[in-house]
Image (cartoon, grey):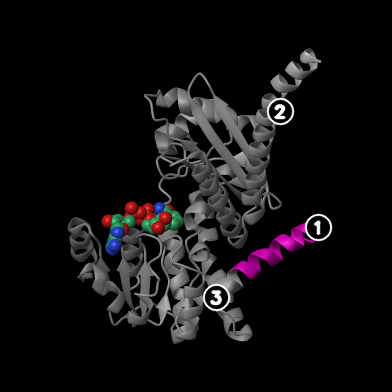
Amino acid sequence: MSHEHSDATSQSPDRDRQGALAHATRSKAMHLFGHLKAYDYGEVHFKFDKASGLKAIIAIHDSRLGPALGGCRFIDYVNDEAALIDALRLARGMTYKAALAGLAHGGGKSVIVRPKERFDRVALFRAFGKFVDDLGGHYITAEDSGTGLEDMEVIRTVTKSVTGVDVANGGSGDPSPFTALGVRRGIEACVKFKLGRDSLAGVHVAVQGVGHVGYHLCKELHAVGATISVADVDPLKTERAQREFGASVVPLDSIFEVDCDVLAPCALGSALNDTTIPRLRATIVAGAANNQLAEPRHGDDLYARDILYAPDYAINAGGLVNVAQEVLGYDAKKAREKTMTIYDTIYEIADRSRKTDAPTYKIADMMVEEKLALVAEGRS
Ligand SMILES: NC(=O)c1ccc[n+]([C@@H]2O[C@H](COP(=O)([O-])OP(=O)(O)OC[C@H]3O[C@@H](n4cnc5c(N)ncnc54)[C@H](O)[C@@H]3O)[C@@H](O)[C@H]2O)c1
């Protein structure tokens, strides 16, 4: 009896511990799959490599159109959950961007949690490359925040499933000129649709942010005779745009109030929000920045004000088109031709928006969902 009792008492706390652990594990698992459900997944792969300290996540949102393509982020995350959510969110965006650009790719994204302790960058990226390779071509990686050409070159030593490698090794180089070309084509489509004009000559475009893409966009616009205003936190960049393209420089916050035809946000996300939208004088918003709408409802606000908004992931896909060409065997001419078709995509979005009386950001999503549904039915 005493033995039974002792058994019972020794088991009881153990059972409690296991129960608590099971509960915690269960609730974690619920949480994990809750995130996957919220983002419509898909599959997620995790890797911990003890030797290099690699902690990486590869999120594959959708691969119905082809292997998932998307960059690898290498940044600090407050915790693992934040890293997972970032990967899920970004990979989902890649599905939409690739599908709308007509690419035979699904959406993927990877994140490497930046180690807190000292680490060997080459060993870390080699381990990551092996992780990518283990997926057998199901996911193709590329540069993103915190990663660069050298990292892609390391990854290339262990897998073929990588893009953004050195031009000397068949890489596609800087994506920014292609992104800018696509934005220029998108602006042309908007100007044709909204203003009935076939050319950008004399059309006034206010460019917020003249970094990599903004600079090349100004170059494109200048070449076709547009009038340009620019704002950037870096005066050297605005001075360069002024010098090379005759751009007028305006104070940072005034860019939203420029009396122009087109506002082209090419800086950070959330440029279109409750504060900026009421101040807009442009009738078109078409730029390169990702996540331009602070919230989806801001797309409704623009629509209600009769401002034609070119959905960000539709107009800024030129860089992705260029990288996707690298997967096939890099050919700049083909990448350029494909990027030029962004005109048709943006025009179709504007047209359907008018015909169905729905904001453009919803039309773009709808067009992607239609494409994916066709593949699901085996009709594409
Ligand atoms: N590089 C690409 O090919 C590519 C592709 C798709 C989307 N995008 C998106 O386009 C945007 C620009 O990309 P990038 O590669 O040119 O980045 P970048 O960092 O080279 O340029 C951004 C520029 O914006 C400026 N800036 C920052 N805050 C500003 C503010 N408040 N007002 C005015 N200017 C400000 C910066 O000084 C910088 O010059 C980003 O949102 C990026 O995610 C880029």
| Cα–Cα gap, marks 2 and 3 | 56 Å
Magenta stretch, residue numbers: 365-380
Q: Assess whether residue 375 is covered by the magenta stretch.
A: yes
Q: Nearer the viewer, mark 1 or mark 2?
A: 2
Q: Assess whether residue 224 is covered by the magenta stretch.
A: no
Image-based side of 327 in relation to 236, left or right = right
Q: Residue 200 location, x and y as percent?
A: 38, 77
Q: Residue 12 location, x and y as percent?
A: 71, 26
- Amino acid at dot 2: Arg
Q: Nearer the viewer, mark 2 or mark 3?
A: 2
Q: Which quarter of the figure is the C terminus placed in? A: bottom right
Q: Which residue is mark 2?
A: 15
Residue name at image x 65 percent, y 43 percent: 27
Tell me if label 2 and label 3 are in contact, CB under 8 Å: no
Q: Which residue is mark 1?
A: 378
Residue name at image x 18 percent, y 61 percent: 239
**263 and 280: which is toward the camera:** 280
Secondary-structure class at tag 3: helix
* Residue 178 in view of the camera: no
